[in-house]
């Protein structure tokens, strides 16, 4: 066999051409990995928002909390279900919440975007263990004080600690900031449920979030609620509920990312092909010599293919390395399923890393195959004469 | 003429390489054009906006409703010629993934304020007489195979329950930017049922559309409308239709920015492919260029030859790419018509794509040109490759 170092030395010899080809492939891999990281980040943010033991109840067919309306009587029936988990005083672990969107100007651009205001009760924090106050305090005067998610406070005017926001014909002071472990709650403002109902004149709840005494009772609980003719409600595991909220936008990112990467990769394959054909043409005499020395057609084919794979893998590594820095970038965009703005990060995972490298190798294989075949088919005599 | 012939011959010397380069460029030019077209389609709503229309909505956010009683009051504001109102219905047709916008409107004033939604007069008559009637866009009809007279049932997400409609007419847009995917029905149908089931939600609408007599006074008229409801429970926010459409577009700004970045990266890939080819060419022709210099050709001749070859290849890539763009763009336009009504490749996009290829052709020749000019004749002739 021809030693692999032959291929590597050849790549190093033609510096400009190799660099240009590697850069081309790395750009494609960068875009490919970037789009996967975006949809992964979105998915992880929303899935992490749901707690595995929590159950979400919204009005039947309403899809999201913002469309849902649950009246007090219905909530009362749910509260009395025997599957409910209760604290030592017999109070059910149930958060009845009001969920509304308000538009506020963003700090960066001054453009308005929709932010969630969630009116919460005493159980809301207990049901979401990842929500923690990191600065300031909880409201003392619920009529005029609110707390804001970390990401909301960074992005919206008036949402920083000590600042004031106006909605529901009142001015509210932000007295605390909370962290929610990178979940969707960080893009929200929380206030007291009674005050929210009053300010927004919504004498109803948007959703109920609750915990069951035993998660295995989910099916019986769901059946009990959904079959009750008094209750036009849907019962979902909170994780499923939040996962379903990323559907439209993550489908969009996936489809757009795949289509763009595909067309884009054809360009890179062609680029690799040009480089490899030139490599074969420039080394015709050399290939003839190798063959005359007794190296088989197969080993010529292998070494040229190896050269193409090394080029594309290097491109892939450069592309993934560049994409790694996207990890530090936060994106905020309107989630089309909920109509509210959500902040999330690009997120690299080992599966994306592997997919990106395989993608680059496939490009190298497709781009290098035909030129390698040509190299292996050269006739010894003619090529030595070239 | 002789020079052009020489350029052409040079470009054809490595046929396979030139063909591959042109192909690579063409693919990238097509991708670039598709992304530009996609971004254009995103702004179709803003382009379709008329300067003499204002939108009045609840100041807190679009999810809050306004009382229907504002209608008469706003009509009193000087400068307001006409008014119509509507609300977002958000029903599900069979499955949530069959999404299309549904509006409950006051029909007569709606079609007066939006003359670009064209409905045949006989269908319009039928529609006005049927409280459950609905006018649907041409592209919805194409998508679901509906026809006039079909019953349609929607499940309400905001307004609970099953809702029965009958298609009474099909509208089409006066120009390509008009959304032909809307489902437009009588507000009274919605409101009567609300009055019976949840009286608290009756008489509430999502927005008013105002027609004004002088577009240059839109800010002033809007401010006058809003000041009327200052400190009331339902404060309003009035802006031009274009501004209103833009707030929706800006909500997805991050995605648009991402696509724009990708479109520049594509230009980067085109550049790399062509620069690669030109760099190879330069390496192969060192001795040949030196030979031409001894024959008396000057530096600018060589520059012209290399630049010319690069531009020829780039332009061919641009042209082939435009043809691909036309084919794929037309196909994509049909496939995406339900989601992006305005998806059509425009002349500026074609020109922009070809221009991008041209600029890249020039840029890619910089390195080979400097190399050809730097090598002195003796060194060049000495190369034995």
Image (cartoon, coloured by chain):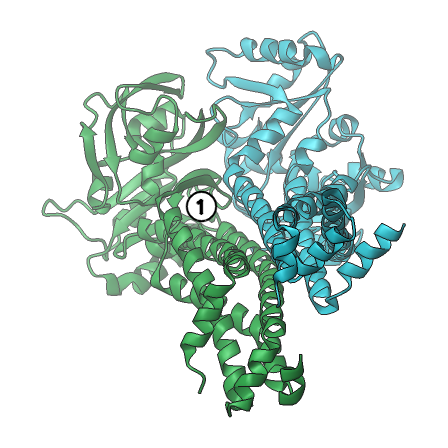
**Total label count?**
1
> Residue at point 58% right, 56% down?
A260
Chain shown in cyan: B
Q: Nearer the viewer, residue A85 or A365?
A: A365
Q: Is residue B325 visible?
A: no
Q: Which chain is green?
A: A
In the displayed orientation, state which residue is furthest to the front. B378
The crowd level at tag 1 (other Cα within 10 Å; few <14, some 14-19, many 20+) is many
Q: Position of residue A144 (x, y in %)?
A: 28, 19
Q: Which residue is mark 1?
A: A64
Quarter placement of the C terminus of chain B? bottom right
Measured along the vertical axis of the image, is residue A26 above or below residue B264?
A: below
Q: Residue at x 50, y 50 (%)?
A: A249
Task: Indicate the position of residue B67 as horizontal and vertical percent values.
Answer: 56, 22
Please name whichever residue, B334 or A126, is drawn nearer the observer in this view of the structure. B334
Left or right relative to A35: residue B329: right
The spot of residue A209 in percent (x, y) is 30, 47
Relative to residue B137, is residue A137 drawn left or right?
left
Q: From what the image shows, is residue A18 above or below residue B352? A: below
Q: Mark 1: which secondary structure?
A: loop
């Amino acid at each position: 066999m021809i030693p692999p170092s032959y291929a590597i030395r050849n790549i190093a010899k033609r510096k400009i051409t190799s660099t240009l080809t590697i850069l081309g492939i790395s750009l494609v891999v960068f875009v490919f990995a970037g789009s996967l990281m975006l949809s992964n980040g979105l998915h992880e943010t929303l899935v992490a928002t749901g707690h595995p033991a929590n159950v979400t109840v919204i009005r039947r067919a309403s899809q999201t909390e913002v469309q849902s309306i649950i009246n007090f009587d219905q909530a009362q029936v749910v509260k009395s279900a025997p599957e409910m988990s209760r604290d030592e005083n017999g109070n059910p672990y149930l958060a009845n919440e009001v969920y509304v969107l308000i538009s506020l100007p963003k700090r960066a651009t001054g453009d308005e975007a929709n932010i969630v205001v969630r009116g919460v009760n005493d159980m809301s924090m207990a049901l979401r263990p990842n929500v923690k106050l990191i600065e300031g305090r909880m409201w003392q005067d619920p009529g005029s004080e609110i707390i804001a998610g970390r990401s909301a406070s960074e992005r919206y005017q008036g949402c920083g600690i000590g600042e004031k926001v106006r909605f529901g014909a009142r001015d509210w002071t932000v007295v605390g900031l909370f962290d929610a472990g990178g979940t969707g709650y960080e893009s929200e403002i929380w206030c007291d449920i009674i005050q929210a109902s009053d300010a927004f004149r919504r004498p109803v709840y948007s959703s109920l979030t609750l915990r069951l005494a035993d998660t295995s009772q989910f099916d019986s609980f769901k059946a009990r609620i959904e079959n009750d003719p008094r209750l036009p409600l849907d019962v979902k595991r909170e994780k499923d509920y939040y996962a379903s909220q990323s559907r439209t936008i993550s489908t969009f990112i996936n489809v757009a990312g795949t289509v763009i990467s595909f067309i884009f990769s054809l360009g890179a394959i062609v680029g690799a092909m040009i480089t490899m054909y030139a490599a074969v043409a420039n080394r015709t005499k050399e290939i003839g010599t190798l063959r005359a020395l007794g190296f088989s057609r197969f080993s010529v084919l292998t070494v040229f293919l190896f050269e193409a794979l090394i080029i594309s893998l290097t491109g892939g590594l450069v592309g993934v390395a560049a994409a790694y820095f996207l990890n530090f970038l936060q994106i905020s965009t309107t989630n089309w399923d909920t109509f509210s703005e959500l902040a999330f990060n690009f997120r690299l995972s080992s599966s994306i890393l592997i997919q990106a490298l395989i993608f680059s190798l496939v490009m190298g294989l497709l781009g290098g195959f035909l030129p390698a075949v040509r190299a292996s088919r050269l006739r010894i005599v003619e090529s030595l004469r070239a | 003429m002789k020079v052009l012939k020489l350029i052409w011959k040079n470009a054809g010397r490595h046929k396979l390489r030139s063909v591959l380069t042109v192909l690579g460029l063409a693919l990238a030019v097509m991708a670039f054009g598709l992304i530009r077209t996609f971004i254009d389609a995103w702004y179709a709503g803003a382009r379709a906006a008329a300067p003499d229309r204002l939108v009045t909505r609840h100041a807190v956010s679009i999810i809050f409703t306004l009382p229907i009683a504002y209608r008469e009051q706003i009509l009193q504001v000087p400068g307001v010629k006409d008014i119509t109102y509507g609300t977002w219905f958000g029903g599900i047709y069979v499955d949530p993934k069959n999404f299309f916008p549904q509006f409950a409107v006051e029909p007569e004033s709606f079609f007066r304020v939006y003359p670009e939604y064209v409905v045949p007069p006989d269908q319009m008559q039928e529609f006005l007489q049927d409280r459950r009637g609905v006018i649907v866009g041409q592209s919805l009809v194409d998508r679901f195979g509906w026809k006039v007279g079909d019953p349609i049932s929607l499940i309400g997400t905001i307004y609970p329950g099953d809702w029965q409609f009958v298609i009474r007419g099909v509208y089409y847009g006066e120009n390509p930017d008009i959304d032909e995917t809307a489902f437009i029905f009588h507000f009274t149908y919605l409101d009567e049922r609300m009055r019976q089931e949840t009286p608290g939600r009756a008489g509430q609408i999502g927005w008013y559309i105002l027609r004004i007599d002088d577009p240059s006074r839109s800010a002033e008229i809007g401010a006058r409308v809003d000041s009327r409801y200052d400190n009331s429970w339902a404060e309003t926010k009035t802006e031009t239709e274009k501004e209103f459409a833009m707030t929706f577009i800006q909500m997805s700004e991050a995605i648009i920015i991402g696509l724009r970045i990708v479109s520049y990266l594509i230009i980067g890939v085109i550049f790399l492919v062509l620069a690669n080819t030109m760099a190879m060419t330069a390496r192969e022709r060192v001795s040949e260029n030196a030979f031409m210099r001894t024959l008396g050709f000057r530096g600018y001749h060589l520059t012209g030859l290399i630049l010319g070859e690069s531009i020829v290849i780039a332009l061919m890539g641009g042209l082939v790419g435009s043809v691909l763009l036309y084919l794929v763009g037309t196909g994509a336009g049909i496939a995406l018509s339900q989601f992006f009504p305005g998806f059509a490749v425009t002349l500026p996009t074609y020109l922009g794509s070809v221009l991008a290829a041209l600029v890249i052709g020039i840029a890619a020749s910089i390195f080979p040109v400097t190399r050809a000019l730097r090598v002195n004749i003796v060194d060049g002739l000495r190369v034995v490759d």
